[in-house]
């Protein structure tokens, strides 16, 4: 267990103007990432100058930022425990939950934890199955795993292989988890441009899977432009081996080789060109979905899950570089979109980047039916500036189910975990936080919380480098959320917490 440390008062802001300005210029000049804007295979390292390294060490000495690996948090959060990586040593990614189990994705496979006692989670099984980024979900006896790296075949023994080779494979893997100690690989479906993330739309007999992928290339036989939609897979629960793609709805119709999405640079400098979606969140109880699609945010109707239909589309060509993920509030009259400026591997939580880039964008949903529109209200970003050696930007989070309030817990990579209230769409505010000090002081190392989700009274965080963290928030504004008990939670398949929960 990692020892707790009390919060230190930060006495001044980091003076990293030159470093941050140079990094941002590099990001903007480079344009959208050619492959995976997320941290890749955790090998990314950004060299920093001797002066920048010295400045980071001085900031630690002055109490401006925590020390290397030091844990700090607000008074209303407890760091319950940490489970370091074991046999599966790659980059930790997303989380899913079912009953007393947590399922943790990793670029090398996945781990199943028994969290019946959140203070002492136990490792139930570890499955080696490389294929970044292994985005993970569960439904009933099935577990779904995304592969968005070109592999020699669809097995768990595959090796890396160039996407220029026709025989290469990327897509969706399906496991039977009826025996949590012995998951069995039962099916695979290849999808165009792989599966960076996926979202479940579960029904009684079938599970529909919305596969998000992007960055086509004319040299890739299985991923050529235009790639302006998503793959829809139908999975029969009783016969997952019959899973198949049933539709590829075009979400960005338009003329030209890339369809009608955001053209990106040079038309919109520093903005990703839309060549698919990064992530989709569905709200089945309302037949709604929100898509974060590189240069665009979309709202669509999923009453017919095989044929999702776009209702509205928005862009932010001033402050959003890469539309990464989306979350509805409980009443489905707001959407929080995240901007993953720098692809998750840059230091963007500082005064020079500012409060409106690499942030959350809060949008109200106004109107009814097909006339519903997304209307921008404000940005939210953590105010605790991070070191030049810390990758930090808005990433994955979930609602904390409190009636009458819109409260969310969210991961910020090395910026840690933030709990914030957006009940007033125009005036969001942070109410709690947890973070570690920088992983290093001499280089930019990719680490930190990939996902931070609230499940049955606790916050669970999958730290890319440090492992599986359990947090407990004790605050009158969030305490009611502990009464909501879920049987299953895939955050991108957002539940109606107050109709679906078990008293």
Image (cartoon, helix red, strand yellow):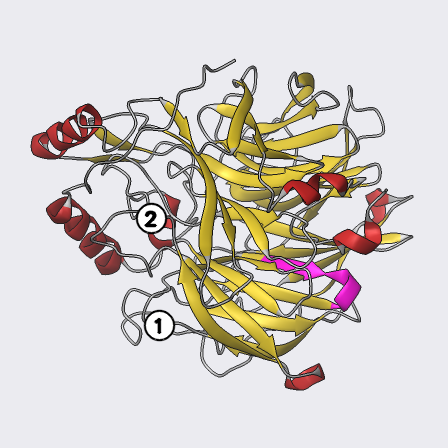
* Nearer the observer, 224 or 388: 388
Label 2: which residue?
Answer: 383
* Nearer the observer, 302 or 223: 302
Image-based side of 341 in relation to 449, left or right = left
Magenta span includes 38:
no
Label 1: which residue?
Answer: 317
Image-based side of 201 in relation to 45, left or right = right
The structure residue drawn at horizontal position 61% and vertical position 65%, both measured from the top left corner, is 290
Q: Is residue 324 above or below residue 415?
A: below
The structure residue drawn at horizontal position 47% and vertical position 36%, both measured from the top left corner, is 449
Write the start and end of the magenta stretch as one range: 280-287
Where is residue 140? Give x, y as percent: 84, 40
The structure residue drawn at horizontal position 60% and vertical position 43%, both measured from the top left corner, is 476
The structure residue drawn at horizontal position 55% and vertical position 56%, both measured from the top left corner, is 213
Q: Earlier in the sequence, mark 1 or mark 2?
A: 1
Q: Is residue 284 above or below residue 77?
A: below
Mark 2 burial class by Cα count in 10 Å: few <14, some 14-19, many 20+? some
Q: Residue furthest left?
A: 51
Mark 1 burial class by Cα count in 10 Å: few <14, some 14-19, many 20+? some
Where is residue 236? Give x, y as percent: 87, 50
Q: Quadrant of residue 106?
A: top right
Q: Is residue 436 above or below residue 188?
A: above
Magenta span includes 282:
yes
Image-based side of 176 in relation to 342, left or right = right
Secondary structure beneath disc 1?
A: loop
């Amino acid at each position: 267990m990692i020892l707790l440390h009390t919060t230190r008062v930060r006495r001044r802001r980091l003076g990293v103007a030159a470093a941050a300005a140079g990094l941002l210029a590099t990001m903007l000049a480079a344009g959208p990432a050619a492959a995976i804007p997320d941290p890749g295979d955790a090998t990314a390292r950004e060299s920093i100058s001797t002066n920048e390294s010295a400045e980071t060490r001085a900031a630690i000495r002055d109490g401006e930022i925590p020390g290397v690996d030091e844990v700090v948090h607000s008074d209303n959060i407890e760091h319950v425990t940490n489970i370091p990586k074991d046999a599966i040593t790659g980059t930790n990614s997303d989380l899913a939950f079912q009953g007393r189990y947590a399922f943790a994705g990793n670029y090398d496979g996945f781990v199943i934890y028994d969290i019946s006692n959140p203070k002492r989670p136990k490792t139930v099984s570890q499955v080696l199955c490389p294929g970044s980024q292994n985005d993970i979900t569960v439904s009933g006896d099935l577990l779904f795993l995304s592969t968005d790296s070109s592999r020699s075949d669809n097995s768990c023994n595959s090796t890396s292989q160039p996407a220029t080779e026709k025989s290469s494979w990327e897509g969706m893997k399906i496991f039977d988890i009826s025996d949590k100690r012995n998951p069995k690989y039962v099916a695979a479906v290849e999808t165009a441009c792989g599966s960076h993330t996926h979202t479940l739309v579960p029904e009684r007999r079938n599970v529909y899977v919305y596969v998000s992928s992007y960055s086509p290339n004319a040299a890739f036989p299985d991923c050529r432009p235009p790639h302006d939609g998503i793959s829809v897979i139908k999975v029969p629960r009783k016969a997952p081996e019959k899973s198949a793609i049933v539709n590829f709805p075009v979400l960005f119709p338009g003329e030209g080789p890339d369809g009608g999405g955001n053209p990106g640079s040079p038309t919109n400098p520093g903005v990703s060109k839309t060549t698919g979606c990064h992530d989709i969140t569905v709200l089945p109880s309302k037949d709604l979905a929100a898509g974060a699609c590189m240069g665009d945010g979309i709202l669509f109707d999923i009453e017919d899950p095989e044929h999702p239909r776009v209702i509205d589309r928005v862009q932010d060509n001033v402050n959003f570089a890469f539309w990464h993920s989306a979350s509805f509030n409980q009443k489905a009259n707001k959407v929080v979109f995240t901007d993953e400026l720098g692809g998750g591997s840059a230091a963007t939580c500082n005064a020079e980047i500012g409060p409106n880039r690499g942030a959350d964008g809060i949008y109200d949903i106004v109107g009814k039916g097909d006339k519903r529109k997304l209307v921008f209200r404000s940005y939210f970003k953590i105010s605790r500036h991070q070191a030049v050696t810390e990758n930090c930007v808005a990433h994955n989070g979930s609602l904390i189910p409190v009636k009458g309030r819109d409260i969310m817990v969210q991961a910020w990579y090395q910026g840690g975990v933030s709990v914030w209230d957006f009940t007033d769409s125009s005036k969001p505010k942070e109410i709690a936080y947890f973070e570690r000090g920088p992983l290093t002081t001499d280089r930019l190392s990719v680490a930190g919380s990939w996902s931070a989700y609230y499940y049955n009274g606790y916050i669970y965080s999958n730290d890319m480098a440090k492992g599986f963290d359990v947090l407990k928030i004790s605050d009158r504004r969030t305490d009611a959320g502990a009464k909501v008990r879920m049987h299953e939670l895939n955050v991108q398949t957002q539940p109606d917490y107050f109709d679906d929960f078990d008293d």
